[in-house]
Image: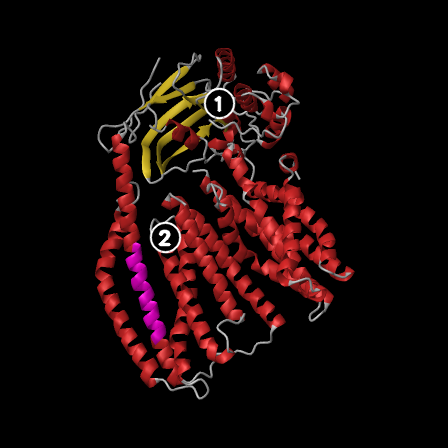
Amino acid sequence: MTELPTNKAPSIIRRSSPLKLIAENLTIDRGGRRVFQDLSFTLESGTALVVTGANGIGKSSLLRTLAGLVSLAGGAMHVEGGEDDRPLAEYAHYFGHQNAVKPALTALENLVFWQSFIASVRIDAFAGAAVPPEEALATLGIGHTAQLPAGYLSAGQTRRLALARLLVTPRPVWLMDEPTSALDTASEAQLLGLMNDHLGSGGMIVTATHTELALSNTRVLHLRAAEPVRTLTEELDA
Amino acid sequence: MAIWDYANPTRFLRLVQIVLPWLTGLCVLAFAAGLYMSFFVAPDDYQQGDTVRIMYIHVPAAWLSMMCYSIMAVSSLGTLVWKHPLADVSAKCAAPIGAAFTFMALVTGSLWGKPMWGTYWVWDARLTSVLVLLIMYLGLMTLWRTMEDPIKAGKAAAILTLVGALNLPVIKFSVDWWNTLHQPASVIRMDGPTIHPDILWPLLVMAVAFTLLFFVLHLMAMRNEILRRRVRAMRLRAASAAQPGTAAATAQPAE
Amino acid sequence: MSSWGVALFNRDLRLSVRIGGSALVGVLFFLAVVTVIPFGVGPDLNLLARIGPAILWIGALLATLLGLDRLFQADREDGTLDLMLMAGRPLELVVLIKCLAHWVATGLPLVVAAPLLGIFLNLDPVAMGAVTLTLLVGTPALTLIGAIGAALTVSLRRGGLLLAVLVIPLAIPVLIFGVSAADAAIHDPVPFLTPFLILTALSLIAAVVGPVAAAMALRFSAD
């Protein structure tokens, strides 16, 4: 916040320093109910944070909070090592339960729209590059559907089309809520490959999942109910 | 529970407890004086006779209908800008009261108009503006009712209230324009500096009485709304206690 | 306009053209309303000519309101709205562009159909031109004001009726000056330009207030 913008030496050094996602004392209320309180963690470049916990514990809420879709009742979150004053949500891709695919548009049209609509993040610390839409579809094994209306795609194909969105616009943080749902074993392996590539190029992943994911560099954030009503939080150590 | 356990509403409830009896007493006194003055002190109109006494209800009601909306607009600013926890309670509780006053202004206006115009309703500029205001009140109340979460509903209603507040002068202006276009103004004007003190005093006392009535009703409604939200919060807590875990998060390292 | 804006505009336009021809439904509804009114008031051509501009305006208002409930709801239901909120684009501009695309797909066809429907209402050429011109200037205001209602009711399953109730009081000035301007052109009690310029001003105000209020409502609805 106190840095002077651009062409000053400290700023340039800071920019090439590794990315870090910092969440401090996150507290959220939804529908008049406290979901969690004082949740803090730090996530470094190239690391995945796997959020586990029972149903209804607030995994999805946590991801939506990080995506800026749920307003914070307290706490702060930001990305260190990126551009100043850019909210976390604009560094992040949100891959939720909904696919945001329009059945009336072709697969390619869907993807091309998202590529031009979502602002990409270009910073030194993140090596992810924009994949051309056709190539992204081919990578995910749905290249043959490019000119078909997305309404004709199967559930798994639609899910992969939604996933292609993450490839065509580079953003360092992937927020993935149950990413393996509606995917078969082969696609799941492919998804894991993509996620590992993303981590390899300096990206970060926060994912909520019930299944074990074989990711290269993971840490686990386990959400569980506190016994008393007042809550305790431990800092996640490295 | 999030906000509702904390100082503000609690302190507010205590304040209401102290202020309300006094305010109610004042209101009753003002009404006694105002009604006495308007029925026994104020003179008959040389043309309208006793009918003119409707004015002592109609004018304060019309005034309150506007004041209510202003209070809602300020409360909406409180919700959106200052994020004050009581602001949307205030706005929500003012809406039905405002709608009631607006309705009263419409009914008394058309009753008053019957002997003058020979019909209960004319599309007079002021009556029409008040009718539009009533529709806006009712729309806001419906919006509040259809949204389950009071906080979300409060925000949505605040946006609509403010847009309405911006729009009300435009509506007033356009209805006046429309009215002069279709029928030249022929209604008697009650405002203006020429009003006789014999009429003015009862009118002012009644206006004070109505304003006090508004505050009494508003404070009572706000108290009820706060209690209603506490009940809702307690029920939610009871529901979430039954299923495993919602309250806290702990983090543990792995690998 | 920047490329993302063009992409959004094209996408929305393409969607409204491809999905069930919503433009066509709006025009059909407009036709139905205009057809039904002579059954109500009687086939007196002089009367119809006199109230013709008002009928066309009310028909346009209703047809516009009819299509508005899906403006943001469709995007909310499939998760598109969430991504739009995170895209790093100014949401007010996003709303404005969506409104523009929606107007081109549903409002513009109404304007084009108005002269044809004017024939049924015994409007003379001047009146027809005046009504069409006022609709061209005024219907964007209806869409933009309606966007506020659409954003407020975006999370409600059956928000269409409520949307109309919320929006109609706000749309009254547009209706008044639209009809006044059209009437002024026909049997000038006042000059045409005065109400017409006020109507233009209302559209411009709506272009500011509508997107700002709708964007605020959409941000709250994501919660």
Horizontally, residue C197 falls left or right of residue B105, namely right
Gap between marks 2 and 1 measured at Cα: 45 Å
Q: Secondary structure at mark 1?
A: loop
Numbered badge on residue B87: 2
Q: Amino acid at mark 1?
A: Ser
Horizontally, residue B67 falls left or right of residue A191, namely left
Could you tell me residue C86's position as x and y percent?
Answer: 51, 33
Q: Quadrant of the N terminus of chain C?
A: top right
Q: Residues within 10 Å of mark 2 (few under 14, many from 20)?
A: many
Q: Nearer the viewer, residue B50 or A127?
A: B50
Q: Amino acid at mark 2?
A: Ala
Q: Nearer the viewer, residue B241 or B82?
A: B241
Residue B69 picture quarter: bottom left
For residue B213: magenta? yes
Numbered badge on residue A17: 1
Could you tell me residue C66's position as x and y percent?
Answer: 57, 47
In the image, residue C45 above or below residue C94 = below
Could you tell me residue A137's position as x and y percent?
Answer: 60, 18
Q: Residues within 10 Å of mark 1 (few under 14, many from 20)?
A: some
Residue stretch rendered in magenta on the structure: B206-222
Q: Quadrant of the C terminus of chain C?
A: top left
